[in-house]
Each structure stands twice: as C-alpha cells, then as structure tokens.
Amino acid sequence: MSSLTYELFLAGLAVGSAAALTGVGLIVTYRATGVLNLAHGAVAMVCAYVLRQLVVEWGWPLGPAACVTLLLVAPGIGLVLDRAVFRPAALSGAGPARTLVASIGVFVLLVGGAALLWGGGARADAPVLLGDDPWAQVAVAVAVACAVGAVTRWTRLGRELRAVVDNRELAVLGGIAADRVAAAGWAFGSFTAGLTGVLLAPHVRLDPYGLPLLVVEVIAVAVVARMRSLPAAVGAALALGVAQAQLTRFHPGGWAGPLVQALGANLFVVALLVAALAVPAVGAGGGRDAGGPGAAGADVLPRGTTAGARVPPGLWLCVAVALALPLGFAGADLRTSVQVPALAVVLLSLVVVTGRGGQISLGQAAYAGLGALFTALLAAGRVPGLPPLPELVALGAAVVLVAPLGLLTGWPAIRRRGLALALVTLAVGVAVSRFVLAQPYATAGLAVERPAGFLTDRGYYLLELAALAGALAAVAALRRGRTGRALAALRDHEAGAEAAGVPVPALKVLAFVAGAALAALGGGLLAMGVRAFDAAAFDPVRALLWFAAVLVLGADSLLSPLLAAALLVGLDAGARGGAAAAVIGLLAALTTRVPPLTSLLPQPPPGPRRPWRRRPDTARPAAARTAPGHTPGAGPGPDRGGSAPGAPRATAALAVTKAPAAAAAPPVAGAGPPPRLRAVGLVVRYGGVTALDGVHLALTPGRVTALVGPNGAGKSTLFHCLAGTVRPASGQVTLDGADITRAPAHARTRLGVARTFQEPALFPSLTVEENVRLGAERGHLRTAPDTAAEQALRLLGLDGPVRHHPAAGLPTGVLRRVELGRALAGRPHTLLLDEPAAGLDARETAALARILAALAADGTAVLVVEHDPDLVAGIAHTVHVLEAGRILT
Ligand SMILES: Nc1ncnc2c1ncn2[C@@H]1O[C@H](COP(=O)(O)OP(=O)(O)OP(=O)(O)O)[C@@H](O)[C@H]1O
C-alpha cells in the first residue's frame, strides 16, 4: 500500500470509528426507547464544548476533565432528556412522530443554547483526547460495541433491554422497570454522543452548527443497520469512512472533478440519502390497525401538533399594523426587518405541507436555497446561453423551476410517514445543501440585485409585503377549498381520506410541489433582501429550526409563519445569536406538554363556517337527483319500483332514525340483478399465516350480504381486499367484470365502492358537514356535491346544529353516522361496512338496520362484516360464514 493510500486509510478509520460510536449510541437508544434521537449530534457538540471549557478555559488536566465530561456530563444530559422530555412524552402516549418533533426541539435548543453560551464562531483549540492514532479510536469504537453486545447478552440489564425491545407492554407486565431500561439507554446513548463529540472536535471545526450536522449525517450507519445490528453499524461506518477518505485521491478532469470532490467530502450524506430511500420502514409503526396494514398509525403527526386555530379578524388588523411598522424604521432596523416577510413566505410553505397536509418536511431550507440560487444565477446571467434576466422575471422563473423539484421529497412521501419521511426529507435537504448550494459556483461571491424600482430597503419591504399578501391569500384559498379539505383529511386520517376518494399519492406530491414553490419564492426574496446568495442561510440546521418554529406556534395557522419569522429575525437581531433557537427549541422539546401557541387564541363557538360556493345543480343528471346510493344502471332493487325520484326509500329512513327502535323489515328473498363486485379465488398470506385461502364472494345490487366468523377467520382481510387496502397474493377482485385487483382504495371509491372502518375514520378537524361534503366531492358521482351532501346529512339525521360541530369529540354513535354519511354522499353502488354496529346502543343499532335495509331497497349492494347476530339476522339477505380463510357457506 502506498504511503498516501495508507495515510488516507488511517484518516478514514478515524472518521469511521467516530461514526461507528454514533451508530452504536443511536441504535442502543432506539432499541431501549423507540426514539431515533436526532439531537445526538447536538449532545456531542455540547460535550465537546464542555471538555474544551474545562481544559482550555479553566485549565483542568485532560484526564479528569474527560472523565467529568464523559462519565458525568454526557450521561447526565441523557438522563435529563429522559426525565424532562422523552419519558413525559411516552407517558402522554406520544407516537414516534411526536417524539421526533421533541428530539428536533432538543437539537435546536442545544444548538441555540451553545451559540448563546459559547458564541457562534468556530473554535480550533478543542483538546485532543486520543492523540493522532486512529487505531486507538477504532479500538475504542470496537470496544464500546463489544461491551454493548456483552451487556445485552449476558447481564440482567441486557435481558431486560431485550424484553423491552421485544414487547414493552409484556415486559412491564412481567415486572421489568421499562423506565429504568429507557433511562439506561439514554445515559449510554449520550455517553457515546459525548465520546463522538470529543473525538471529532479536534478534527473538524467546533461550532454550534457544524458538528451536530456532521453527526446527523452519520445517522446513515444506524439506518443501514436497520436500527438493529451493532456489527453492521460499525462495519458500515468504518467502510464509509475509509471509502470517503480514499475518494479524495481521485481528481478526474471535467464535470466529474467537482462531483468526485464533493463525494469525497460527503459520502455519509449520500449514504444517508440512499439508506433513507432504500429502507422505507424505519421507525414505522408496525402494528395492525383498523384501516388495514399500515393505514394509519402513531407515526403521523397528531392533529394536536399541527392543528391551527381560526384567527379573529381583529388580530389580522393588528398583524397588518405590525407588519407596516418597519416602514417607519430606518438604517439597520429596516434592513433587518426586510428579512421578516421573505422568511414568512418560506415558512408558509410548511403551513401547506405540514400544517394542512400533516407531512413532516425537514427539507424546506433546500427549496428556499434553490430558489435563491436560481434567482441569483438567472439574474446574473450565469446560466449558459441565457442573457441576464430582470430580477423579478428571474425570481418567477426560479419558482417555476424549483416547484417540480418538490418531487424530490414529494415522491418518497407517497410511501413514507413519520420518522421515515423525516429522514428522507432531511437527507434530501442535506444532499442539496452539500452537492448544490455549497458548490464553488454558488459560493464564489454570487450577488443578486433587487428589482428596479425597489432598490431601497423601504421600497423592497413594500414589494415583499405584496408578495407575502399574495402568498397568504393563495394559501388561505388552498386551505378553504376542496383541496384544503382533502389535505386536512390526509392529515387527520390517511386511510380515511383514501376511503373518501381522495387520491392520496397525488395530493402528497401536490403539497410538496406547492411547498417547494412557496419556499423558493421566499428564498429568492431573502437573497434579494441581503443582495447576495449565502448558502449558509439555507443549511439543513435552518430547516430544523424553521420546522420547529412553525410547529410550536401551530403549523396549520396562517398566523404562525408571520409570528415565527418575526420571532426568529427579531430575537436573533436583538439578543445574542441563538436566542431564537433556544426559545423555539425549548418549546418544541416540550411539544407533548405545550400546545401550539396559536391554538390558545380565543376561539368562536362552533357555528357555520364560510359556506362553500354552491354550483348550480341544473347540470346534474336525473340519476343524481335520487338518493345517495342510487346508481344509474345498478338496476332496481327488490322493491325499487315504488321509489319516486327525489323521495327514495333510503331518504324515508331519516324519519326512522329519529323514531323509537323497531325491528327492521325482514329480508326479501328472490332473484336480483347480477353481482357487480366479486372476489374470485382470493389468497392472502401474512408470512406463514394464510389469512384467505381461495375465497369467492359476490355482492349483488339490492342485497345485504353479511360476513361472519370467529376471530382470525380472515373477515377483515377479505374486506381489505375488496376495499383496496390489501393486495392478494393470487385471485382477482372484479367490478362489472373488469379486474380492479390492483386499483388503489381511492380509485375504488371513485368507481362506486365505498367503505367504512371498524374504528370510525373521520377527520376531526373538519366539521360534520365538511366530512360528509368531502365524500360528495371525491366519491363516485361528483356532479352535484351540495345536493348529495345535504341528502346524506338529512338521511343520517345530521342536518341539525351538529353539522357545524367539528368531528373531534363526538360520541361513537354520531361518528358512525357521519362516516356512513360520508360514504353515502359519494353515491356509491356498493357499500362495505366493517362492524358498523360496534359501539352503538340498541336504539342506534336498530336505526342503522333500517337505514341499511332502505339502502338495499334502493339498489345498493351492501357487505356487512359484523359480530352482532341480531343485526345480521334482521337485515342480511345472504350470510357467509368464513373460517380459517375459507368460506364455509
Ligand atoms: N397485518 C398482518 N400481519 C400478520 N398477520 C395478520 C395481519 N392481518 C391479519 N393477520 C392474520 O391473518 C389472520 C386473519 O386475520 P383477520 O384480521 O382477517 O381475521 P378476522 O376474521 O377479521 O378477525 P377479527 O374478527 O378478530 O378481526 C389472522 O390469523 C391474523 O392474525
């Protein structure tokens, strides 16, 4: 081996061993607590600063200082995090997404706190703990990994850890103090963070931002190891470290030169991106739930975290006045204020993506940076073949160019939620920052002028206000309209949104594209404001700070971006740098205990929201004027002949829902029209379990089919196959003879197959009326949504004051009616009901039976998976018994 290769090998080993320590610490903490601690790097940075403080500032000998730092301070930080942040979060039932927000809060808090305490500048005098011998570092990393392995395998704590990892609830029932295990996990994780920090600090610049971010990139090795295997993490870390170092030997000419150079400095970033894209299930809640496998879970941002409040009009007036105040400022104050509207536009992008759509996005700074970069390049004429564009044209072009790049995070978001989505968006943000924004062409003094006519600070501020007003109006319109309702549904209950007919993948992409466009607009404005492109202004740490800021203020409130921008710019301008981050980080770390601040605004009592714009119903076809449930071509049901248009049998059931309980009409036997929806030879396996074993089923218009059977028989699996939330290993689902086996859930709703859930899948932030309206807008027949929604509301007895009530907090009986109303408002021809009587009292069950009988009489095909034998006997024309994945009768 040549000496250069060997030198680089050793340098790579040094970096790799620090990364290995991080990987080991992250995995142990994750296994013990279920938290992927994004703040690991921030803890590392704080420990490095503490060691430096003890040795350099206070003159302590290195040995004792290192012992205090690594054996007291580092585990102490872990224990404080456990007691103050993560244990309360776990006790409050916070899911992975919420604890992720808390760990972002800790990250931001520690970064801000360090900047406040030690200043933002880089320190080059961090004490060297292990000399220059990389083998010593490798030995430390391997020794730590082996020690963890030994403890896990051979000690009581290790056995307890494994038990907690396998099944926390069972372990607790078995007498294991899971809290003690979690505390040990946090203490150990922080110890490894501290070790990483003090080992890395002498080799990289020690500053509050750089080191934490460096360690964030190293999360890659834990993800590669699937948050499980310590040897895999250590191996990946060492291999990446060595490969990254070796890459610096190569200097190809042409376009490949800068790329190889960038790779040589950022191989861990590439690994993070690849790992985040290739391992979609990181941190995903593995449990089953009512909406089908992976339908909804604890890994989405809960409504309480994202919901915003309605802003009283008077407050908007105050905001307008406050925004106009800087026009009276001068000099540095006005120059500082210029950042506020631009930053508010960037933060508005998070209102769309995270606030309304419920999608975690830690990559918005990348889109803002791209907007700024493209604006600068286009305006400066630095794009080959293009003359310099006028500044405003350049800004507009940048927005148009960046918007489709929203796919970079929007596409992965289709199949990811929670932690997995956070990792991908973070990885995209870091990759764009390192491979695009921080490249020489972008960093070498790229100036950007303000548009002609707006050169002064005051003039430019006015221009920004106009842009902000436009962006606010656009986002307000988006939130109010049909798309806004669909986004709120996506946020509140993804599987429910699919079932209502919302094309979830397309909507996610749309949210990210709109978010990218807004961020780009804000980024371009920010760059023009300071008359230069500065890559550091858009680094990934900003993305975390911005995300935390919008979340703590209330991500679904239009007010939050304005307040957050004022807070971030104002606090950092007035106090020492880092104050804003410290305040926001603290609030975000306590996110499970502190509600979003704008939600504390006094709220008006529930009442009619702004009415939707009614489209004239004159264009609707005659069929649409009949009841929900009727479909042209569905053929008459058993008693259809007597139903007059507009006064169908199902509508008549409205009266019955309010009447005292009475037996439903007995099923009428007889030949009907041919089946529409069919299951043909369905086979579904979950690992070694065969849930369905060649099942055939046909649903006929005008008939109620009941599916009964013991627990585990496969009823839900069959139901999910028909609804489109489970794809069979073999067999077909056909509709009118056409194969729809691969059609997604929302497409089936649009084809006329509506469903409800075992646990009502409603959108708590929408009113009863909006929930039902969504079904009418996205369902099978969408020509007259107003009429369909009204009919459904009336049919289910929801047309009283309750229609204006948010679905959150309504009793189960009402929720079931709202969900049924939403399904019926789309005018389905086939209705799939999963245990519709669960949680209903006898009176409500009788009313439900009458409605179902009336719907069948109107021609709807109804499938009921039900345990209530009375309900089944009262309404079903056909009863199928399923056992061990086979239909018996
Ligand atoms: N996501 C899954 N992963 C692994 N096994 C599963 C999954 N879903 C269902 N199963 C298994 O498939 C079989 C059929 O389950 P299914 O939920 O369809 O039955 P069911 O009749 O609906 O039962 P219940 O009435 O209890 O809901 C069971 O053995 C169940 O344990």
Image: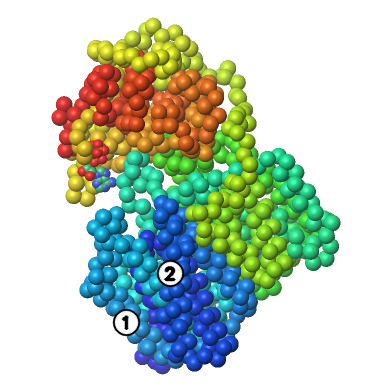
- On the image, the x and y values in percent for residue 382 come to 68, 66
Q: Which mark is residue 143?
A: 1
Q: How many marks?
A: 2
Q: Give the side of residue 704 with respect to residue 409, left or right.
A: left
- Can the viewer see residue 836? no
x 60%, y 30%: residue: 607
Q: Which mark is residue 79?
A: 2
For marks 1 and 2, give the CA distance: 23 Å
x 34%, y 31%: residue: 839
Q: Identify the element where label 2 is drawn.
A: helix
Q: Give the side of residue 94 with respect to residue 317, left or right.
A: left
Q: Quadrant of ligand 1?
A: top left
Q: Identify the element where label 1 is drawn.
A: helix
Q: Give the side of residue 344 with respect to residue 486, left or right.
A: right
Q: Which mark is residue 506?
A: none
User: Mark 2 belongs to which amino acid?
Assistant: Leu
- On the image, the x and y values in percent for residue 599 come to 59, 46
- On the image, the x and y values in percent for residue 168 come to 30, 57
x 24%, y 13%: residue: 669
Answer with the quarter of the image where residue 178 lies. bottom left
